[in-house]
Image (spheres, rainbow, N blue to C red):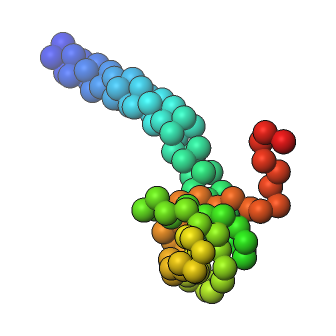
Amino acid sequence: MSSNFVVAAAAGGSGAAALVQIVPLLLIFVVFYFLLIRPQQKRAKEHQAKIEAVAKNDEVVTGGGLMGRVTKVADDHVEVELAPNVKVRALKSTLADVKSRAAKPAND
């Protein structure tokens, strides 16, 4: 009879032990979500909004590091003037940064 009692007690304790093991994992996931995943999603949304709002005369930087001024905007690409009479077409998805001409320079 005592052996049945020990088995029953061990089975009841294993549920609590499993919960104690899962709680730290959940806590780690919550910390990762608020410190890494959520801010990254916010930055991605802001970047996507910038890319969608690109307009003529905005200054852009492509993923390859080319800097220039937008001269024409289409649905999925933009025409960028890198130097006088040097124009290239770039996909909007390859734009790394967009600086609006309406933005005031920091040192003025």
The answer to whether residue 17 is above or below residue 2 is below
Q: Residue furthest bottom?
A: 74
Q: Which residue lies most toward the top here?
A: 2
Q: Residue at x 63, y 86 (%)?
A: 74
- Name the spot of residue 68 as percent of width and height, x first: 59, 66
Query: Percent from the top left, x then y, of residue 7?
Result: 20, 22
Q: Is residue 7 above or below residue 69?
A: above
Q: Position of residue 13 (x, y in %)?
A: 32, 21
Q: Quadrant of residue 98?
A: bottom right
**At 66% from the left edge and 79% from the top edge, which residue is drawn?**
71
Give the quarter of the figure containing the N terminus. Answer: top left
Could you tell me which quadrant the C terminus lies in? top right
**Residue at the location (60% across, 75% down)?**
84
Look at the image and tell me whether residue 97 can be seen: yes
**Left or right of residue 47: residue 101:** right
66 displayed left or right of 46 = left
The answer to which of 69 and 99 lies nearer the viewer is: 69
- Nearest the viewer among 92 and 40 is 92
Q: Nearer the viewer, residue 103 or 93?
A: 103
The residue at the point 41 percent across, 26 percent down is 24
**Quadrant hosting residue 100:** bottom right
Q: Nearer the viewer, residue 105 or 27?
A: 105
Residue 67: x %, y % from top left: 55, 62
Residue 90 vertical placement versus 11 (above, below): below
- Total numbered circles: 0
Residue 19 in sight: no
